[in-house]
Amino acid sequence: MAQRIAALAGKAGEHSTAIPGLFLYYRTTPTPCYRASYEPSLSVFVQGRKRIILGGTEYLCDGSSFLLSSIDVPAQSQIVEASEKMPLLCMFLSLDMPTVREVLSRNDVPEVEVPSHRQGLAVGETTVGLLGACGRLLELLDTPEDIPFLSHLIQREILYRILRTPQAERLRAIATSGDLSQRTTRAIAWLRANFARPLHMEDLASTARMGVSTLHHQFRALTAMSPLQYQKQLRLQTARQRMLMDGLDATSAAYEVGYESVSQFSREYSRFFGQPPIRDIKALRDSNIAAVKVA
């Protein structure tokens, strides 16, 4: 599987494929922590190591792991093991939720006993069946004329293989109509689109069509943080990205993401990232320059 991904990718970077929603990742250097947004998707790691932090919970993915994301969550991501000789190799597949619901509606899909994991991310051990199905999906790239007919069938098998693992609960919760988790995703989507606006819990609860206390409970169960903490992380991570990638100064970034006080922004930024904005951005740029020189 690692050899196939490396051959298909050809070089370091993110690579789209002829199969809609299927991407291949080939990374040759470790990275500092950076903002990552996870949509409903499956990532199968076959080489290297990556660390993801969501709400204080750390997820470690290696060559025997898959990562299942069932909601759009903001997290911190870091490649911790990757090199030219041993690159990080990963297959990413965006999940089509109508297809997920279709598979779940079948009577012959068995229910498995699952732990009480409620967060929006789940890491599991890749099974032989799941790896085999993913391998067959990659093989389709050698025969593009087969993709329109066979891709959907193989992706259905991939969903079935996920549903046979303990991590299936996350997929079931978000895909089942009427589930509280599904309503909570409405609040998450609103926050992602409007994180710079003032947050009023009554309005957010109305968007999710549930009471304020129920929303707090469900929101924390899925994201490991409160709506206010979620908004704060979105603001801080977006500000960091704008300063690092677009050259904004701290004041401009603070106002752009919704802060009315620059001093409050600096305090919260320092608590979250460990140092003030200017020092943090300089350290990130220096580490990126060093990584390029090593590569």
Image (cartoon, helix red, strand yellow):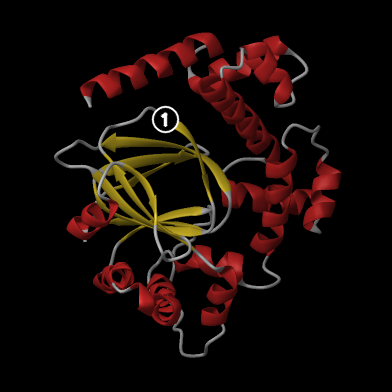
Residue under the point 21% across and 60% down: 4
Camera-side residue of 58 and 253: 253
Visible in this render: residue 259? yes
Secondary structure beneath label 1 = loop
Q: Quadrant of the C terminus?
A: top left
Judge whether 284 appears above or below 99 on screen. above
Whole-percent x, y for residue 282 in the image: 45, 12
Residue under the point 29% across and 45% down: 26
Instruction: Judge from the rendering whether residue 195 lies leftward or rightward of residue 81; answer left or right.
Output: right
Judge whether 17 appears above or below 213 on screen. below
Judge whether 116 appears above or below 29 on screen. below
Residue under the point 55% across and 19% down: 271
Whole-percent x, y for residue 214 in the image: 74, 54
Instruction: Judge from the rendering whether residue 32 lies leftward or rightward of residue 255; answer left or right.
Output: left
Camera-side residue of 288 and 113: 288
Name the kind of residue labelled 1 in the image: Cys
Q: Extreme left residue here?
A: 85
Whole-percent x, y for residue 285 in the image: 41, 17
Q: Extreme bottom residue here?
A: 107
Q: Quadrant of the N terminus?
A: bottom left
- Give the tally of numbered discs: 1
Residue under the point 67% across and 73% down: 177
Q: Extreme front residue here?
A: 145
Visible in this render: residue 154? no
Judge whether 255 appears above or below 102 on screen. above
Task: Report which quarter residue 184 is drawn in.
Answer: bottom right
Camera-side residue of 111 and 66: 66
Q: Which residue is mark 1?
A: 33
Whole-percent x, y for residue 81 in the image: 24, 37
The local crowd at label 1, few if under 14, some if 14 to 19, many if 20 or more residues have their Cα within 10 Å, is some
Task: Report which quarter residue 235 is drawn in.
Answer: top right
